[in-house]
Structures are given as structure tokens and as C-alpha cells.
Image: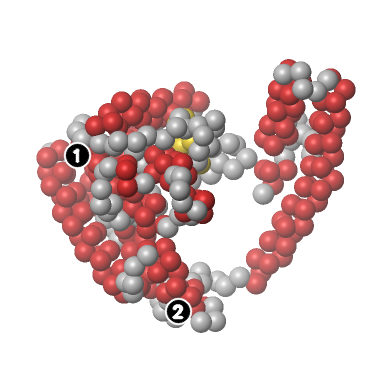
Amino acid sequence: MKRLTAGAPFAAGADSALFADAKAKIAALQKAGKIDPAQADRFVAAQSAAMTQSMQPAYARVAAWLTAERENTALEPQGAHALPNGRAYYDDLLKLQTTTGMTADEIHELGLAEVKRIRGEMEALKSRIGFAGSLEDFFVFMRTDKRFFLPNTDQGRAEYLKASETYLAAMRARIPEQFGRLPKAPLIVKRVESFREEPGGAAHYNSGAPDGSRPGIYYVHLADTGATPIFELEGTAYHEGWPGHHMQIMLAQEMTGTPKFRGQYGYGAYIEGWGLYSELLAKEMGFYTDPYSDFGRLGRRSGGRSAWWSTPASTPRAGARPRRFASTPPTHRSRRRRSARRSAATW
């Protein structure tokens, strides 16, 4: 929160991200002849006043509340079961996000089976790679060997973004082999802005404009490249970009003849399921020529299962704690539900 109110106009130094963006838009209006220099100066002054007189005090109040409230938090993390009617609330959320009638225990058991299945695929791939040790030893190898990490420098970060763009360009060229419709909005890859970047933060997607006037953005946290191994890079690109979140979300938003909310609302199991389906589709299309990258794909799937599938059964139970599984190298938050068809006409 402190980073949101750092820099100009709050204090001396470089412009904050919000102030810099506002000034750039004002400059563009002036360049287009829509406002004169005097108007531009007034707009900049008004922006500065709004940020220092309204925004900054409001954030300061929130920060003060969070600091004071921390003393009231429980020593151990609390789940939905700690709330009044927590079990019923949690069950309703499961139904909402999965669109099924599966109970928490049923989801949990399905997850255990999925993790076991994926672990079998990992064992087979480890053998094909030629690693002599156990699967747990292989996890340690992939977490610690320097070959799997780019330098934590500007050059290393640039290499990560470039590699992501290369994978996505290759996939984009072959998308018509699988889908009949493509979204209007282009896709770009960007590093998360410094004011909200976190070491090891999950990559994510921001949707573009349905008319194609604003691109979709695949955001990557690169504050610490040691937290973003390159064996996860390829699968993450397909999950977030082509044919993953970018294509699914943008085509949904472009739909016509249906209520607008149908294109805007998202169900967790379907959206993340589509992302994981996209990773598997890339495998079926012949991508992941690097076996370590393919192992990273399995690690992402198993890691997502371990967090997602272990939580439902344990969270509603008073006193129970989520289980974790030693089944993957560095994990990535994701969920899976297989989608039925590849034809984009289903959108």
C-alpha cells in the first residue's frame, strides 16, 4: 500500500505510476489539439490535488486500520468454518465456482486421484530424461540447478519476456488449426508494474477491449527471477495467453445476442480449467519440445491440484488445516476442469 502513494505528487522523486499515466493522457490530448497548454496545466494540477488531498489521506486511513487490526487476527489462519454458518457458506461457494453439486469431500478425493495420476506421468518423464534419483530428488534438482533460472538482472528479465513472446507467437500462428474464431484484441506481454509487483507473484491476465481497441495483457512478476523458473515459462504463456485466458475471456466478451453479464462473469473452475486445458492442448499440438518444460507443465498441474483440491475438504472442518503434497517443483496457483470442445463456435 505504501508503494501506491510513493513518488510524485506525494513526495519528491519520480512520478508515481498513476500520476505518470494521467500526465501522459493529458499530453496526448494536448498533442491531438483537443486542449491547449493552459488547459493541460490545469488538468495536471487538478490530478495532483486529487491524489494528494483525497487519495493519499484515504490510503493512509486504510493503512492505519490494517496496522491496528493486525493485533486482532488469529495466530493460526482461519477458514470459512470459523464464520457463522461457515460450512453452508463454503458449500455455496463450491457450487457457485464449480457449477456442480460435488461436495467438498468429493472434490478432495478427486484431487487426490488427479495428483496420483499426474505423479505417475512425472515418474515416466523423469525416466525418459534419464535422472537416476527419486522423484523427490528430481524436484530438488529442478528447484536448485542454475540452468533453470535466468539472471536476476534487467537482461534476465528481458530474456524472460522475450521468450514468452516467442512461445506465444509460435502458438498464435497455429491457433487456426484448432479454433474457428479468434478474438479481435491483440495480446501483449508485460512485466507487472513496480508499485504492485511481488517476488514470486502469480502471473495473470488482464482483458482487453471487446472491439480490439485495447490489447489483452499477460502480466509477469519479475522482481525476483529466482521465483520464476524457466521450466514453467512455456506452460504459463499458453495458460495466460494463447489459447488460454486471452482467447477464452475475450471471445466471451465479444459475444452478441446474450445479456452482457454472460460475457463478463467468470466461474473459477471453468476459467482456470480452460487455462489448464490450453496447456494440455499445446502438448497435443507438439509444443513442449524441451522435456524439462514439459515436466514444468506437469508440476503446474499437480501444484495447482495440491493447493486447490486439498483445501475444500479441510477448510470447512473446525480445527482442520489444509494439506500439502510433495508432488511438484515450485508451484503455481491454478485449477483444472477439462473443457469439452475445441471449436470456438461454442462461445
State whether residue 260 appears in this view: yes
In front: mark 2 or mark 1? 1
Crowding near the residue tagged with mark 1, few <14, some 14–19, many ≥20 C-alpha atoms within 10 Å: few
Three-letter amino acid code at disc 2?
Answer: Arg
* Image mark count: 2
Q: Which residue was labeled with disc 1?
A: 284
Q: Residue at x 36, y 55 (%)?
A: 270
* Residue that lies at the very extreme toward the front in this rendered image: 257
Q: Position of residue 313 (x, y in %)?
A: 35, 73
Q: Position of residue 268 (x, y in %)?
A: 41, 57
Three-letter amino acid code at disc 1?
Answer: Glu
Depth check, front residue: 40 or 333: 40
Picture layout, residue 284 above or below residue 330 = above
Q: Position of residue 320 (x, y in %)?
A: 40, 76
Q: Earlier in the sequence, mark 2 or mark 1?
A: 2
Which of the 4 image quarters holds residue 278? top left
Depth check, front residue: 346 or 187: 346
Label 1: which secondary element:
helix
User: In the drawing, does residue 292 fall left or right of residue 161?
Assistant: left
Depth check, front residue: 68 or 141: 68
Crowding near the residue tagged with mark 2, few <14, some 14–19, many ≥20 C-alpha atoms within 10 Å: some
Q: Residue at x 81, y 48 (%)?
A: 54
User: In the drawing, does residue 140 fall left or right of residue 122?
Assistant: right
Q: Position of residue 154 (x, y in %)?
A: 50, 25
Picture layout, residue 24 above or below residue 285 = above
User: In the drawing, does residue 13 fall left or right of residue 146?
Assistant: right
Q: Residue at x 44, y 44 (%)?
A: 255
Q: Tag on residue 271?
A: none
Q: Which residue was labeled with disc 2?
A: 87
State whether residue 240 appears in this view: no
Label 2: which secondary element:
helix
